[in-house]
Image: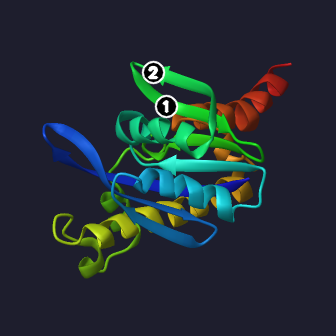
Amino acid sequence: MTCASVDIEVEFLRDTQQVSQAGIMIGGRLGIYEGKEAVYDCLKLLQQINNRRCVSIYAHNFSNFDSYFLLKALPDAEIEIDLVYLKHNSVIFVKAFDESKEYFFFDSFLFFSKPLNEIAKMFYTRKSFLEINKKTDLWVYLAFDVMYLYYFLGFNYQFFKQVYMAKFYKYITIAQLSYSLYMNLFAKKLFTLAE
């Protein structure tokens, strides 16, 4: 399984939200795109550089924001939607495919319910890097979000794999992951002791 991170930025034009920029990071490669085709360009990079059969794509706040733009761009990239999970009118998970790959779209906010810059402050303390002005340095801000999310997910994937032997990408929410860990690590022992 390969992991990718995506972020989409919009602007208001005539009372509607229009994509202004989108970024993706996969396999250590960063792509930042501008304009109305930015999300499509991210999906094309995803299709071109990945040689794995399955890809997990994470967007922070996917459920309430990025999913709308990604779902709209998938057919243009010739990626078919197979499965969509909704919770309270929010898209929390999407499974899609093309002729060579399966794509799983997740909301990283459902695992880490803080803005990315707050998560970054827990691990990275150099203020100059964390105080990027979104309005004047949008490209830098977007690149930071995509790269930070990518590496943060990679760290957590390795952590859960090494410590708990759990595959992070198989879960949609932190609650689902926590329940699985509890059942696999503790509940089995409790039931064994009770017998």
**x 29%, y 78%: residue:** 129
**Contact flag, marks 2 and 1 (Cβ < 8 Å):** yes
Of the two numbered discs 2 and 1 on the same chain, state the one appearing first in sequence. 2
Up-down relation of residue 117 to residue 19 (above or below): below
Residue 144 is situated, as x and y percent measured from the top left of the image, at 38, 69
User: How many labels sit on residues?
Assistant: 2
Q: Which mark is residue 92?
A: 1
Residue 90 to residue 62: above or below: above
Q: In which quadrant of the rendered image does the C terminus lie? A: top right
Compared to 2, does 130 lie above or below?
Answer: below
- Whole-percent x and y of residue 174? 53, 38
Report x, y in % for residue 125: 32, 76
The residues bearing labels 2 and 1 have C-alpha atoms spaced at a distance of 7 Å
Q: Which amino acid does label 1 sit on?
A: Ile
Q: State the mark number for residue 87.
A: 2
Query: Looking at this view, is 178 or 171 the one in front?
Result: 171
The reply to whether residue 156 is visible in this rendering is no
| Badge 1: residue crowd in 10 Å (few <14, some 14–19, many ≥20) | many
Q: Is mark 2 on a helix, strand or loop?
A: strand
Residue 18 position (above or below residue 163): above
Q: In which quarter of the image is residue 75?
A: top right
- Closer to the camera in the image, 83 or 187: 83
38 or 57: nearer the viewer:
38
Q: Can residue 31 be seen in this view?
A: yes
